Image (tube, rainbow, N blue to C red):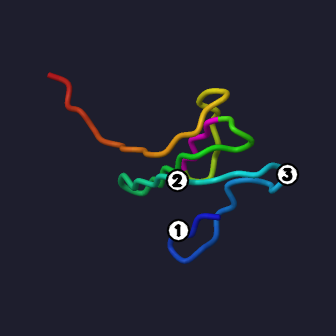
Amino acid sequence: MLWKNGLPIKLSDGSEDNYAYGIDVFGEDVYVVGHEAYVGRLWKNGVVSSIYKPAICYDVFVGVTQAK
């Protein structure tokens, strides 16, 4: 469960064990990394993406680069 602006955002439906280890905020976006059933996961504003299996992700950093 992630809280954003005082509102709960579910990261999972609860059917699998999941763990969130890292969080970063960039603008209005909230990024969380961890794993669900040992599949690496990245959640952006509560929307999940698979990263790698098997994996556990511990940290996230979001930044911007400026193209020249």
Which residue extends farthest left? 68
How far across and down, in percent of the image, does residue 11 sit? 67, 55
- Which residues are drawn in magenta? 40-44
19 with respect to 15 (left or right): left
From the viewer's side, name the closer residue of 18 and 44. 18
Mark 3 and mark 1 lie on one chain; the one further toward the N terminus is: 1
Q: Is residue 25 above or below residue 7?
A: above
Q: Nearer the viewer, mark 3 or mark 2?
A: 2
Q: Which mark is residue 4?
A: 1
Q: Quadrant of residue 35?
A: top right
> At 65% from the left edge and 64% from the top edge, which residue is drawn?
1
Choose the circle earlier in sequence order: 3 or 2. 3
Secondary structure at numbered mark 3: loop
In the rendered image, which residue does mark 2 sit on? 21
Front residue of this view, candidates 52 and 2: 52
Dot 3 crowding, Cα within 10 Å, few <14, some 14–19, many 20+:
few
Q: Residue at x 80, y 54 (%)?
A: 13
- State whether the magenta stretch is mostly helix, strand or loop: strand
Q: Which residue, given by chain and number where applicable, does mark 3 sit on? A: 15
Exactly how many numbered labels are in the figure? 3
Question: x%, y% of residue 53?
Answer: 67, 27
